[in-house]
Image: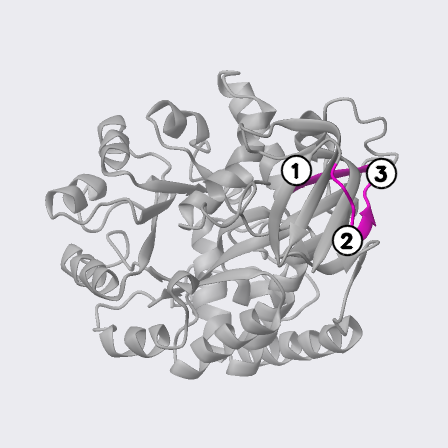
Amino acid sequence: MRTLVRGGMVVSMDPAVGNLPQGDLLIEDGRIAAIAADVDPADSEVVDARGKIVMPGFVDTHRHTWQTAFRGIGANWTFREYGVAMHGTFRPHYRPEDVYLGNLLGRIEALSSGVTTMLDWFHCSDRPENADAAIQALRDAPGHSVFCYGAGFADDSIATEVKRVRSQLPDEGMALGLRGPQLTSLDTTADDVALARELGLRVSVHVHAATGWPSGERPIADMRDRGLLDDRTTFVHGNGISDDQVAMMADAGCSVSISPDVELKMGFGWPETGRMLAAGIRPSLSVDDCPSAGGDMFATMRTAFSVQRGLNGGLTARDFVEFATVDGARTCGLDARTGSLSVGKDADFILLDAEDLTVFPVTDPIGTIVSAGHPGLVDSVFIAGKPVKRNGRLLDVDLPALRTRLLESRARVAAAAGVPLDGSWAPTASAPRR
C-alpha cells in the first residue's frame, strides 16, 4: 500500500533531508519510501497536506500515565505533596480497571496532541494485575509505547514479576524503572541493573537534588564505581547533579529525560537542557505527571526553551524540536525506527494546521512550532503510515464512553481515599508517603 502526503511544509529533523518549503512524503508498507519536493503519485492514495506542517511525531520519554484521572488536581503541589497525594493517598485504592482507564485515556490524549512514541513510567505496580492492566491499555491505544516497569520504593526482590512482565512484551516494548539510588539502597540498584541486563532491558531512574541522597551524596559516582552506568541508562530530571557526575554520565553514554514544567514548579531546580548538552548529552523531553502539568509536548518545549534562553541564550528552537523528536527516540533506543522523517524509518508523523490563526502566517516552521505551537494545531496523526487522527478527530475511539468510565473511576478512587473533588483538598505531610 502506498500513500503520498503531498504539498506540505516538511520539517524532517534529518540533516540529510532538511526542511522543504513544499514537499511530498511517500509511504510504502508503513515506512517512509521517499521525501522530495515532488514525488510521482502513481498508484498512491494522496493525502493533501497543503497548508500543513509535516513533521515527525513527538517522543515523550517519561510519563506516569496511570494518574490521568486526576489531571490538574496537583497544580499547586510541591514534590512532597505530590508523593503524599498520588502514592500515599490515591494509589492504594487503585484497582486494575482504574489503572487501565488512566493509561488508556492518557495514551490517547498524548496521541491526539502529536505524541507518537511514549515511555510509560509505571509505578502503580502494587499487584501483578495492575501491570497487566497498564500493558493492555497501551496495546489498546494507537501509537508506539514502551512500558517502563517501576517496582515502587521497597528493597524486595522483583525478579520473578519483572520476568513475568518481560515475557509479554517485545524487545523494544519494555524498560525497567530503577528504584534507586534515590529511593532504595545502592545494593538494590545493582540488583535491578543486573536484572535489566540479563533481560536486555534499558533502565530509567529518577535522580535530582530536591529530595537529597539517602544512599550518599554522589549517586552517579556511586553507580559508576559499581559499573552500573552504560548507554542503556536514562536519568530522569538530573537537577543539581554536580558537573563531574554529569561528565560521568556523558562518558558512559547515558541519556537524560527532562520534565521542565514539573521540575520548575516542584522546586527541583532549573531544567538542565543546556548543561547536559554542553557535556555532550543530547537531552530528551517528557511531561512527567498530568496531575501537576499539562500533557502536551508543545508546552514542554516552550517552557524548556524559554528557561534556557533566559539563563544563557545558548540554544535555538531547533534544538528543542530535536529534543522532542529524534533525541527522544534515541533515549528510548528507537532512533533507527522513528524520531525523524527519514527514508526507511516508520512513517510516524503529524500534520499541523499552518493556517490556524494562532500561527498564520508561518514563516519559520520550527520557530513557530516552539514559540506558538499547541495541541489544537494537530490536524492528523499517522502511526506506521496508518491514520489514527484526521481532520482534528481521533479515529475508531469511543471517547464519550471512555470519558464516562474515567469519571466513574476517579469518583470511586477519590471516595475510597476520602478526598473531595471540589478543589478544597490539599495533601498534608502527615499522610504516609506510600
- Kind of residue indicated by mark 2: Ser
Is residue 395 found left or right of 295 in the rendered image? Answer: right
Per the rendering, the mark at residue 35 is: 1
Label 2 packing within 10 angstroms: few (<14), some (14-19), many (20+) = some
The image shows residue 321 at horizontal and vertical percentages of 58, 34
| Front one among 86 and 116 | 116
**Residue shown at the point (59%, 30%) measured from the top left:** 17
Label 2, label 3: how many angstroms apart (C-alpha)? 17 Å
- Indicate which label's residue lies in the foreground, 2 or 3: 2
- Indicate which label's residue lies in the foreground, 1 or 2: 2
N-terminal-most mark, 1 or 2: 1
Is residue 186 found left or right of 356 in the rendered image? Answer: left
> For the view shown, which residue lies furthest in the top direction?
313
Quickly name the residue at label 2. Answer: 44
- Kind of residue indicated by mark 3: Arg
Q: Quadrant of residue 272?
A: top left
| Front one among 208 and 41 | 41
Q: Is residue 246 above or below residue 401?
A: above
**Residue shown at the point (22%, 28%) measured from the top left:** 244
- Kind of residue indicated by mark 1: Ile
Q: Is residue 51 magenta?
A: yes
N-terminal-most mark, 2 or 3: 2
The image shows residue 15 at horizontal and vertical percentages of 54, 28
Quickly name the residue at label 3. Answer: 50
Range of magenta residues: 39-55
